[in-house]
Image (cartoon, rainbow, N blue to C red):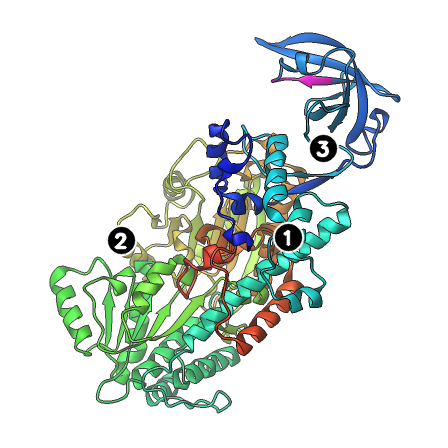
């Protein structure tokens, strides 16, 4: 029997039926049967094999036998608190029972108990407010929690560690023995792993810390192996049938430019960078290859990905075959960005005879109907838009390529919806917030990867400065000089309007202050997500045309706004933004030939950085990390390096959007920390798939449960 088949209900465990509220609390953790119970792994392990007397409380957690000396009571306001005085052979201490007056009966005077807990020295005595205890002589059949390595589980209020351990022990004793291995025996032997039944028992109740480490390594490898099996199967599925009209160009042949591509490059007043040339070559190999393209294009802010996508779209138009040209759809997350792409596409591509259209949800009915008819008739070559590109009433004549810009802002079902509009069209996803290659191969292992690491010539690196709020006047003076020289500036804030968030500034209040008090002589406007699309469009167009000199905003301007004359980006309360957001915002300047600047203005006390968290709740390490993020921004403009740093600060789940998307719900594995194991698991999984393309993925494996619900192209974001 496999663990995935252990779908027996929890009510088969002794004691669960009498604790219905516990069943509800277990369900909150996704624990609904014995399989999910056994996969609820410990977050830590306590070694209670070694005795630690009271006098050594400062060295380690106490693990000793004590005698109860006396009880006493005190009052904290209206709350009665029990004090239990204990001693062992080395010292005396006090157990402070804040919520357990019943412990007076549980811990009677004269009784002898095993005690475990963290003790401190307060008010002239050794004391503990959180501890575990056990009668020296157990009066029932329960196994002792002492003299062993004990698991500590992530639990909610109302679920005690002791009760949960008893449930786990029952499940292991009754059901874990006959569990079968879920990865091939040859890999278990090759990697030196534990069999599944032994690994599951040892991860919960190991005989030694060494056995715990081996069990953990075994289960991590299994998770990574099946992750890569699923990735590999998706890659094989994509290559199951040749794409329509494919000429079958060998992957080793140099891909020629299509006629439209050649004509565009001849008209450009500059040459492509080496990174752009390589990306175009990759794309043309895909277009000319036997299988539909599925590629992720990563490039830093301003590296020229949009131009590469236009060249890719021209290749798709030329690849239509037969009597009709191909069609390409370029989808952006916001109307502002989509409109900018459409305008640039019209400027560059319409002189080549390419027919461009722009479609969003705000296109009026009459114009929309005419556009839909033209698209269905093949009278439009490239359509640029937002979510409207996959609306139910929209049909394409010959959709050959889908380009998704800022792809992490689209859900998997949205990507699936637009891909369904064509007959297995190619897919090009683009991201200006690159993630490290290791993580990219994990999250997008079924896609090919291209990277643009160089920048167009003539771009000057943006100079980044840090300033505390108490010195913001100097920042304003600097911006004033840039405005006087004819340049423009952004001011970005974490909040739209004033809220009960301490001294955090908001965009609405600061827009008024900047326009009336700080820069009264310069036209200023406000933009944020709550404004309707037409208002945002008018405001951004005025800023782009130079009619506005200052744009006050939230992070809504993070994506896609291109104003070459803007040379100053001021981000207030910069500690409130993640590294990727800061890098994206900084990338809104530096688009022209003038030197540009980014000012990261931070709170005088970084304690204010965490919403809803009191200063005393922040550790020194947390405050240090906030400062470190800002220093990374000051010292580097390399988006790939910043992504590496962000990965260390936030972990793979947040940086890749996989925690929010539900894509990578791993129990123990961390694809960054376990990068070496991931590489071996990937190699093993792909080798087995080559030998047996029909290799089955366990339907209810902890990895498969999530991956099986996801369409081929999944979420990644920062």
Up the image or down, 90 lies above or below 41; here it is above
Marks 1 and 3, how far apart in space? 22 Å
| Magenta span dominant secondary structure | strand
Q: Which residue is mark 2?
A: 533
Does residue 40 show up?
A: no
The stretch drawn in magenta includes residue 336:
no
- Circles 1 and 2: CB distance less than 8 Å? no
Task: Provide the residue span drawn in magenta.
Answer: 95-99
Up the image or down, 110 lies above or below 668; here it is above
Mark 2 burial class by Cα count in 10 Å: few <14, some 14-19, many 20+: some
The disc, 1 or 3, on the residue closer to the chain's N-terminal end is: 3
**Regarding mark 2 in the picture, which secondary structure is present there?**
helix
- Residue 80 appears at what percent x and percent y? 61, 10
Q: Which residue is mark 1?
A: 197
- Residue reaching furthest left? 366
- Residue 41 appears at what percent x and percent y? 61, 45
Answer with the quarter of the image where residue 708 lies: bottom left
Q: Is residue 343 left or right of residue 704?
A: left
Q: Residue at x 42, y 68 (%)?
A: 429
């Amino acid at each position: 029997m496999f663990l995935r088949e252990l779908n027996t209900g929890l009510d088969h465990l002794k004691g669960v039926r009498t604790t219905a509220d516990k069943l509800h609390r277990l369900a909150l953790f996704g624990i609904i049967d014995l399989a999910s119970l056994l996969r609820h792994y410990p977050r830590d392990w306590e070694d209670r094999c070694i005795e630690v007397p009271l006098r050594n409380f400062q060295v380690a957690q106490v693990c000793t036998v004590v005698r109860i000396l006396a009880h006493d009571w005190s009052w904290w306001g209206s709350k009665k608190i029990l004090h239990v005085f204990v001693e062992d052979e080395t010292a005396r201490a006090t157990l402070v029972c804040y919520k357990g007056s019943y412990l007076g009966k549980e811990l009677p005077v004269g009784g002898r108990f095993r005690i475990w807990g963290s003790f401190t020295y307060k008010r002239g005595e050794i004391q503990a407010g959180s501890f575990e205890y056990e009668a020296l002589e157990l009066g029932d059949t329960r196994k002792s929690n002492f003299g062993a390595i004990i698991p500590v589980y992530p639990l909610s209020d109302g679920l005690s560690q002791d009760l949960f351990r008893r449930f786990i022990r029952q499940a292991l004793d009754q059901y874990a023995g006959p569990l079968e291995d879920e990865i091939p025996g040859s890999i278990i032997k090759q990697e030196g792993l534990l069999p599944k039944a032994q690994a599951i028992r040892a991860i919960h109740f190991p005989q030694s810390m060494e056995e715990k480490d081996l069990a953990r390594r075994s289960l991590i490898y299994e998770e990574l192996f099946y992750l890569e099996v699923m990735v590999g199967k998706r890659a094989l599925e994509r290559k199951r049938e040749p794409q329509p009209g494919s000429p079958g160009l060998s992957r080793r042949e140099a891909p020629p430019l299509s006629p439209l591509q050649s004509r565009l490059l001849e008209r450009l007043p500059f040459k492509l960078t080496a990174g752009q040339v390589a990306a175009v070559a990759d794309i043309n190999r895909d277009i000319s290859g036997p299988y539909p393209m599925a590629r992720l294009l990563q490039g830093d802010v301003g590296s020229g990905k949009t131009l590469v996508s236009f060249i890719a779209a021209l290749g798709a138009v030329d690849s239509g075959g037969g009597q009709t040209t191909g069609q390409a759809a370029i989808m952006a997350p916001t109307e502002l960005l989509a409109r900018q792409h459409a305008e640039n596409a019209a400027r560059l591509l319409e002189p080549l005879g390419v027919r461009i259209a722009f479609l969003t949800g705000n296109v009026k009915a009459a114009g929309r109907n005419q556009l839909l008819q033209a698209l269905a008739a093949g009278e439009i070559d490239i359509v640029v838009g937002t979510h409207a590109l996959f609306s139910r009433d929209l049909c394409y004549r010959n959709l050959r390529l889908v380009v998704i810009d800022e792809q992490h802002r689209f859900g998997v079902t949205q990507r699936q919806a637009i891909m369904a509009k064509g007959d297995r069209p190619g897919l090009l996803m683009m991201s200006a917030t690159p993630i490290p290659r290791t993580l990219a191969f994990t999250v997008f292992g079924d896609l090919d990867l291209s990277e643009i690491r160089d920048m167009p010539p003539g771009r000057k690196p943006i100079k980044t400065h840090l300033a505390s709020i108490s010195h913001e006047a100097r920042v304003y003076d600097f911006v004033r000089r840039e405005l006087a020289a004819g340049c423009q500036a952004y001011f970005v804030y974490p909040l739209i309007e004033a809220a009960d968030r301490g001294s955090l500034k908001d965009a609405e209040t600061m827009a008024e202050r900047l326009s009336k008090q700080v820069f009264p002589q310069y036209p200023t406007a406000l933009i944020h997500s709550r404004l309707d699309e037409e208002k945002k469009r008018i405001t951004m167009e005025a800023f782009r045309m130079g009619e506005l000199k200052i744009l006050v905003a939230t992070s809504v301007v993070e994506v896609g706004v291109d104003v070459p004359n803007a040379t100053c980006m001021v981000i207030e309360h910069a500690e409130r933004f993640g590294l990727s957001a800061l890098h994206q915002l900084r990338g809104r300047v530096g688009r022209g030939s003038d030197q540009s600047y980014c000012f990261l203005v931070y709170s005088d006390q970084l304690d204010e950085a965490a919403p809803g968290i009191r200063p005393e709740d922040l550790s020194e390490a947390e405050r240090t990390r906030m400062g470190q993020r800002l220093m990374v921004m000051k010292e580097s403009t390399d988006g790939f390096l910043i992504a590496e740093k962000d990965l260390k600060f936030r972990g793979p789940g947040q940086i890749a959007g996989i925690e929010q998307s539900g894509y990578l719900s791993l129990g123990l594995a961390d694809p960054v920390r376990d990068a070496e194991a991931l590489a071996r698991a990937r190699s093993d999984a792909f080798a087995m798939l080559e030998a047996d393309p029909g290799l089955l993925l366990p339907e209810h494996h902890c990895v498969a449960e999530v991956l099986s619900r996801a369409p081929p192209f999944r979420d990644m974001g920062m």
